[in-house]
Image (cartoon, rainbow, N blue to C red):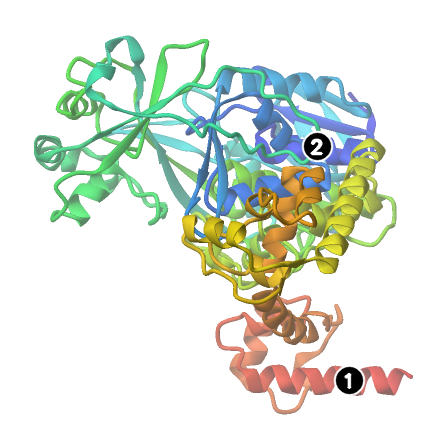
């Protein structure tokens, strides 16, 4: 092509999609290169978006101006709120997706985005000069120049698929791997690791006896992912539940040595929180059964995804154990389950912007950084695309801290601690999760998205209107008090809430368990409560949650201040650790190896003690004083 681009994105999975759209929206001439245009936005594994902690990431992507949330809404065939009986901080949205429609929807969005072009090719080489990326070369002889390159290669780097004792090179089932690019990254001196993940067999729904399965319908009231206008376009359908049994386990154990995982063929590290069915059966022999979710993949297909039984056993064994399961006695396998090994970049070599420390202008996002999951990939792709664009425009980088977003937790964990197994987001990873809820992602991030130019003006207007409603409802609630009459106490007793004996502020009444604004607005004997109906449900729920969590949030804010005191101190790029008195040899070696960008990152390095952090803090203060 011999054209000059601002940003090149390599790979069109969930990370590449967000990276390409972000760069293009920030007025960068962007080129998306994919090995197969037909598989842009493909769901390689389960047909779903969101879930515990993952739903938070989708909401954050949406709040900043990304596309995953809206695309998920418009292609969903079932919605469920997970942890609905627990507090709002750990509740999570999840949807079953029509994976065929999702892929088509994403491709349509990309093809209609200004400043964005798409080509089909394999990137075989990065063009590097003076430790700076200058473009790429492809397998068909093209040299394409660019100011920045974002690698979002997923499982394609030197990928190998395993089914029983059979193995073959692939980045995804029956798709070519990226071998030359992986070899070049190693030759550049980058630290490369090897990971493993797996997927389940796909089943022919016409051969499933659904009468024997437990139906699992979606929620009657749908809570969408997107804060912005999006339409639920598709019919909602159920999933189904069944279980393995002792016969299933016996078939697996009789053939366990035929599994690639147990034959020694696989050397990559797998995810312990998402074990294969072979792992489940061998590691937990005391369990009589394991749950399987039978999930539809598309309204346009009869294919079903049996979530919970990823495997690398031979196809004949997969079929045998599947037919031992209730409801699957006559099932046919459309596609065999498999394990896949692939190379990844040790993420401690990245800056917080996801730019490599040693190669300027080269960014990495998604599974190439050692993560798993569509949502984790999309969040990284978004941040990499934003920062590539901002650097090209000589603007300040966009970095989210741990107290600001789950995305901040994700990136900080990767670049500070690294990972030796596929990294997955959990709510337990976020110290400030009471403040990082799904419902307030727009309050935390939409202003930031608008300020950098990613969130469009119309959605920002909607965000501002919502804020006005939140303020007006909060102010109104502060003015009114609840009287202890028979109507309200009868209602409170009915909902197992403590009754009131004296006039009480609405805030204090709301702090009682089981009390909501929608409940209080039904008390006709108290005229001051009736106008609460004028505010929409989303605004009422947000204000109510803020009130219920107020004490905890105040306490957490003091923890955040201590965190920010260290995190805000940046380490100079050319720091000479040997010249700082008091640091042990071990600490100096660790700091030189990891090259942290902030004291917060340094504090997370194993072996770097609190005393060492104090010494560094004093040294940096002296440095700033001497400069002044």
The numbered dot on residue 228 is 2
Quadrant for the N terminus in the image? top right
The numbered dot on residue 64 is none
Q: Which of the 4 quarters of the picture holds residue 280?
A: top left
Which residue carries the number 1 mark? 621
**Residue placed most toward the observer, 205 or 181:** 205
> Left or right of 449: which side holds 374?
left
Q: Position of residue 278 (x, y in %)?
A: 21, 39
> Left or right of 196: which side holds 407?
right
The residue carrying pointer 2 sits among few (fewer than 14), some (14 to 19) or many (20 or more) residues within 10 Å by Cα, namely: some
Quadrant for the C terminus in the image? bottom right
Tell me the distance, in whole angstroms, between the alpha carbons under discs 1 and 2: 45 Å
Residue at 38% from the left image edge and 21% from the top image edge? 238
Is any part of residue 124 visible from this angle? no
User: 125 above or below 503?
Assistant: above
**Residue placed most toward the observer, 121 or 602:** 602
Q: Position of residue 215 (x, y in %)?
A: 30, 24
Q: Which of the 4 quarters of the picture holds residue 107?
A: top right
Q: Position of residue 569 (x, y in %)?
A: 73, 73
Residue at 55% from the left image edge and 61% from the top image edge? 511
Q: Secondary structure at mark 2?
A: loop
> Left or right of 313: which side holds 493?
right
Q: Secondary structure at mark 1?
A: helix
> Left or right of 251: which side holds 283?
right
**Numbered circles on residues, count:** 2
Residue contact at pointers 1 and 2, CB within 8 angstroms: no
Between label 1 and label 2, give the one nearer the viewer.
Answer: 2
Q: Position of residue 156 (x, y in %)?
A: 50, 32
Is any part of residue 312 visible from this angle? yes
Q: Which of the 4 quarters of the picture holds residue 270?
A: top left
């Amino acid at each position: 092509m011999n054209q000059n681009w601002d940003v090149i994105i390599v790979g069109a999975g969930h990370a590449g999609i967000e990276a390409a759209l972000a760069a293009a929206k920030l007025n960068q001439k962007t080129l998306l290169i994919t090995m197969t245009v037909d598989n842009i936005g493909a769901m390689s594994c389960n047909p779903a978006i969101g879930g515990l902690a993952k739903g938070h990431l989708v909401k954050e992507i949406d709040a900043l101006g990304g596309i995953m949330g809206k695309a998920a809404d418009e292609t969903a065939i079932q919605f469920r709120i997970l942890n609905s009986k627990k507090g709002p901080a750990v509740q999570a949205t999840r949807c079953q997706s029509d994976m065929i429609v999702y892929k088509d929807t994403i491709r349509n969005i990309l093809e209609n985005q200004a400043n964005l072009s798409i080509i089909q090719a394999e990137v075989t080489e990065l063009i590097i000069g003076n430790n700076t990326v200058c473009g790429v070369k492809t397998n068909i002889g093209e040299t394409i120049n660019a100011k920045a390159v974002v690698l979002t290669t997923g499982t394609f780097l030197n990928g190998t698929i395993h089914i029983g004792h059979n193995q073959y090179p692939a980045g995804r089932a029956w798709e070519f791997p990226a071998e030359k690019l992986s070899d070049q990254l190693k030759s550049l001196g980058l630290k490369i690791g090897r990971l493993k993940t797996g997927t389940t067999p796909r089943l022919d729904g016409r051969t499933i006896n659904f009468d024997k399965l437990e139906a699992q319908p979606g929620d009657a009231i749908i809570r969408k992912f997107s804060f912005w206008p999006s339409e639920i376009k598709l019919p909602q359908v159920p999933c189904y539940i069944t279980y393995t049994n002792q016969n299933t386990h016996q078939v697996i154990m009789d053939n366990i040595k035929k599994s690639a995982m147990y034959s020694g063929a696989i050397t990559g590290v797998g995810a312990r929180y998402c074990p294969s069915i072979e792992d489940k059966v061998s590691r937990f022999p005391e369990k009589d059964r394991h749950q399987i979710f039978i999930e539809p993949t598309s309204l346009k297909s009869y294919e079903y995804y049996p979530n919970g039984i990823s495997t690398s056993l031979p196809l004949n064994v997969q079929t045998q154990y599947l037919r031992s399961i209730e409801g699957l006695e006559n099932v046919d396998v459309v596609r065999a389950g498999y394990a896949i090994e692939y190379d990844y970049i040790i993420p401690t070599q990245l800056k917080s912007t996801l730019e490599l420390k040693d190669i300027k202008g080269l960014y990495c996002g998604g599974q190439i950084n050692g993560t798993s999951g569509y949502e984790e990939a999309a969040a990284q792709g978004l941040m990499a695309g934003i920062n590539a664009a901002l650097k090209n425009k000589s603007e300040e980088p966009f970095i989210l801290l741990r107290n600001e977003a789950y995305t901040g937790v994700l990136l900080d964990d990767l670049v500070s601690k690294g990972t030796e197994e596929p990294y997955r987001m959990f709510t337990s990873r976020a110290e400030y999760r009471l403040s990082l809820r799904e419902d307030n992602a727009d309050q935390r991030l939409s202003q930031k998205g608008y300020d950098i130019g990613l969130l469009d003006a119309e959605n920002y207007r909607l965000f501002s209107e919502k804020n006005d409603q939140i303020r007006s409802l909060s102010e109104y609630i502060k003015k009114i008090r609840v009287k202890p009459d028979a109507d309200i106490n009868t209602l409170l007793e009915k909902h197992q809430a403590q009754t009131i004996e004296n006039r009480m502020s609405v805030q204090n009444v709301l702090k009682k368990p089981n009390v909501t604004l929608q409940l209080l607005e039904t008390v006709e004997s108290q005229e001051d409560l009736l106008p609460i109906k004028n505010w929409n449900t989303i605004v009422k729920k947000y204000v109510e949650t803020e009130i219920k969590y107020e004490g905890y949030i105040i306490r957490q804010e003091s923890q955040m201040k201590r965190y920010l005191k260290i995190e805000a101190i940046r380490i100079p790029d050319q720091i000479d650790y040997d010249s700082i008195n008091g640091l042990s040899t071990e600490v100096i070696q660790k700091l030189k190896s990891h090259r942290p960008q902030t004291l917060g990152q340094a504090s997370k390095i194993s072996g770097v003690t609190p005393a060492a952090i104090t010494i560094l803090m004093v040294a940096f203060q002296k440095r700033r004083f001497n400069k002044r």
